[in-house]
Amino acid sequence: MIELLNVRKVFNAGSPSEFSAINGVDLRIAENRVTVLKGPSGSGKTTLLSIVGCMSRPSAGRVKLRDREITSLPERFLTDIRRKTFGFIFQQPNLIKGISVLENVMLPAYPLGEKRTTLKVKALHGLNELNLSGKAASKVEWLSGGEAQRVSIVRALINDPQIIIADEPTAHLDTKLSYRFMEIVEQFKAQGKTVIITSHDPLVYDSKTVDDVVNLRDGKLESEPA
Ligand SMILES: Nc1ncnc2c1ncn2[C@@H]1O[C@H](COP(=O)(O)OP(=O)(O)OP(=O)(O)O)[C@@H](O)[C@H]1O
């Protein structure tokens, strides 16, 4: 469903700090599977994930989403695809300070014009699923690291995305919450969703929930998905 063809990413092209982070990757990520991008620090996992999630464009090569070539689509189309297709869980939760947990979770849904009451029910349900009901009215600056990470997971799911993209999702979670996260991933799969995760964490890449592990080194694939 997502296909990368000879994808390259060069940062700061033409300057002395030019750096080639992705060096010709061919990858097919299948629907309704859980794929982990694994590899040493600096191997290009986050860079590749951001290309897969249409957050950045490759310097060369092609990206296809459900057989549709999206590489050269104008930015407004990409924004629309991002909003409707993907849910993003970042390494840092990136929550907005000064507003409540509930408002943070509802925020990505506003551009889609859903009724606020429906949205609120959905957001509260999501918070409840991750044991955060008691925190709905809290300001995000009061949350612990693990709570903030869980709020960012609920926020990523508010638009019911078909594809979930998670960059080191367990980085700030203890063992118990990391297992809980993988249970949630299992639920996504049962709902027919596709999940793509970058991780250094064996608890993630060795999990039975994971279908494919893609190894990256120096911006290249070491092996094809199993
Ligand atoms: N905007 C940028 N400008 C210049 N170089 C960059 C930029 N973003 C990433 N890089 C470089 O590209 C390489 C790959 O970075 P990336 O963040 O994809 O690695 P990673 O495998 O996710 O690492 P980590 O596990 O440490 O998060 C690194 O050497 C990084 O310094």
Image (cartoon, rainbow, N blue to C red):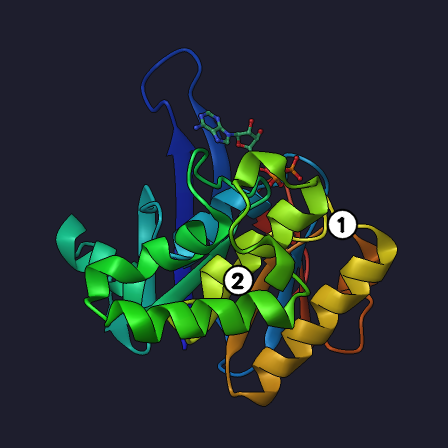
Q: How many neighbours does mark 1 have within 10 angstroms: few (below 14), some (14-19), or many (20 or more)?
A: some
Of 202 and 152, which appears nearest the observer? 152
Q: Nearer the viewer, residue 102 or 85?
A: 102
Residue 71 location in percent, x, y?
A: 25, 56
Helix, strand or loop at label 1? It is loop
Q: Is 30 situated above or below 82?
A: below
Task: Determine whether the residue tagged by mark 2 lies in a helix, strand or loop.
Answer: helix
Give the quarter of the figure containing the C terminus. bottom right
Where in the figure is residue 209, as x and y percent of width and height? 73, 77
Q: What type is the residue that disc 1 sits on?
A: Leu
Q: Please state the total of marks drawn on the protein image.
A: 2
**Position of residue 138 measured from the top left corner of the image (x, y, whole percent):** 55, 46
Q: The residue under label 2 is which amino acid type?
A: Val
Asked whether mark 2 lies closer than 8 Å to ligand 1, one says no
Q: Residue furthest top?
A: 16
Badge 2, how many Cα within 10 Å: few under 14, some, many 20+? Answer: many
